[in-house]
Image (cartoon, coloured by chain):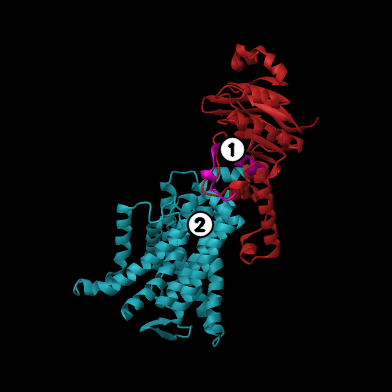
Amino acid sequence: MNALLTVSGVSKAFGGLQALSGISLQVHAGEIFGLIGPNGAGKTTLFNALTGLYSIDCGEIRLNGQPIEGRKPHQVLHTGLARTFQNIRLFAEMTALENVLVGRHARTRSGVVGAVLRLPATRREEADSRERAHALLQRVGIAQHAHRLARNLPYGDQRRLEIARALATEPVLLALDEPAAGMNPAERAALREMLLQLQADGLTLLLIEHDVKLIMGLCTRLAVLDYGLKIAEGTPDAVCRDPKVIAAYLGDEAI
Amino acid sequence: MDIFLQQLINGLVLGSVYALVALGYTMVYGILELINFAHGEITMMGAMVALAVIGALALAAPGLPGVLVLGAGLAVAIPVCVALGLLIERVAYRPLRHAPRLAPLITAIGVSIILQNIAMLIWGKQYIPFPAILPQARHTVYGASITNVQIAILLLATGIMLTLILVVRKTRLGRAMRATAQSRQVASLMGVDVNRVIAATFAIGSALAAVAGVMVSAYYGLAHYYMGFLLGLKAFSAAVLGGIGNLAGAMLGGLLLGLIESFGAGYIGDLTGGFLGSNYQDVFAFFVLITVLVFRPSGLLGVRGGERA
């Protein structure tokens, strides 16, 4: 298996707080890689570092062999890494369809002159974008909400819309920050099916999640963070039995 | 009735110019929460550059049709103002993107003073007459008169505003602008090059300002290095009146302000028994600004009510 994402020795401090200390991990193409750990362990910080939101103090991040540390968020996205957010961050005042269309921005190029003059190339591109955006809404199961404002969507559907928007950027690696948070069991089951389907379609997933049952059943491998350190990495079974992980995160009853 | 209609026409013409300038304030505010006080001076620069071109053409090729001469003036003024707007954004505002909000505001005032002085050095302190290059035909409609220039201003301004609405609502750039206005960070994480979108916003606003500058100097027949100050302040009041950050609000605010000024100037003499005359016209804009700020600080359409861009 070849490594799609390689994180080596990444550290990040905020003032005196060492949020990430020398994190190294590899995500292989086609797998679902889980990232778990107690609150404040540095999971979201790592996501922010990966997506170019935070500059890192030291270390290296490579996606598909290309270094991505030090790039701006929109440049990282161009190399094929898209994400969703722990606390939903949609464009609330835009419709569901428009949110997905913003995701198409990086993969389209037509300018405002073409739009005003209604040039054929621009109209084709816009039509194609809309078609793909509709297909993505369908795929995550919220096609019926296409023309509703994002802020008026039910909570679970907002999470799905975030996934559709991220997929619209045509990522090779999709990073999901607690996608199941606040979902009921039925919604979780549907989410699980959707993620497996995405994997089957060739996408690689990086997943932060607190639902241990979901993550153990879904992930091919996972890494455990605690206080900015990686304390374990491996298959769900191996990680489950690791005494350090049990002490830091899972607790005794999880075994 | 004919006086009423006359003031209505004058108000709409003036208001559509205010609206064009107000759009520039509101678009930049929507994205950066910055009040670009140099925007009025861009309007002035548009008028001055167009006048220079028109003057040069009058010497070089007398007898050219007026519409062509005016078109050439606009064709030079627009790119010059766009370049100026982009330069100001790059040099004066972008380095202060993460500074406290007061810093770019003061910089904006500084830029505005610099532009006034540059214009004064180039074109002097005197009022520059705008040559009557368009045929000065008057049409009489129900006892009120409307000139060719007024008709041209109304048509052009309406066309530009409709185009702008379509661009913001329907195009890739418009979506990126709205996304950036709602969250710069998320927009960039979704692949939008935020700096380019901000630059495009300044470019569009400056182009509108150039057109408005030419309109207003053609309408009054004058241009002056200081004209951008009052015009900018009034357009800013219009943007606040409509709800700053809101496109439809800027258009509505501009038109309302034009009408208020026009009717105010037309009727104030009668209302005060001749105590106050139409030279109090300029006071209305600021009276309106203060009233709005006291009773409805978010403006008529409010920032959150409509689409921000």
**Residue B192, can we see it?**
no
- Residues under numbered marks 1 and 2 in contact, where contact means CB atoms less than 8 Å apart: no
Q: Neighbour class for label 1 at 10 Å: few (<14), some, many (≥20)? A: many
Q: Could you tell whether B92 is left or right of A145 in the image? A: left
**Image location of residue B42, percent across then percent down:** 47, 64
**Image location of residue A35, percent across then percent down:** 65, 26
Q: Residue at x 47, y 72 (%)?
A: B214
The part of the image, by quadrant, that contains residue B126 is bottom left
**Quick one: which chain is cyan?**
B
Of the 4 image quadrants, the one containing the N terminus of chain B is bottom left
Q: Main secondary structure of the magenta part?
A: helix
Q: Are marks 1 and 2 on the same chain?
A: no
Q: Colour of chain A?
A: red
The residues tagged by marks 1 and 2 sit, at their Cα atoms, a distance apart of 40 Å
Mark number displayed over residue A159: 1
Q: How many marks?
A: 2
State the extent of the magenta-drawn residues as a range.
A146-167
Reply above or below: A67 against B25.
Answer: above
Q: Neighbour class for label 2 at 10 Å: few (<14), some, many (≥20)? A: many
Q: Residue at x 37, y 65 (%)?
A: B256
Q: Residue at x 69, y 24 (%)?
A: A217
Q: Disc 1 marks which amino acid?
A: Arg
Chain for numbered disc 2: B
Mark number displayed over residue B295: none
Q: Which residue is mark 2?
A: B88
* Discs 1/2, front: 1
Instruction: Depth check: give the residue in front, B219 or B113.
Output: B219
**Image location of residue A253, percent across then percent down:** 61, 12
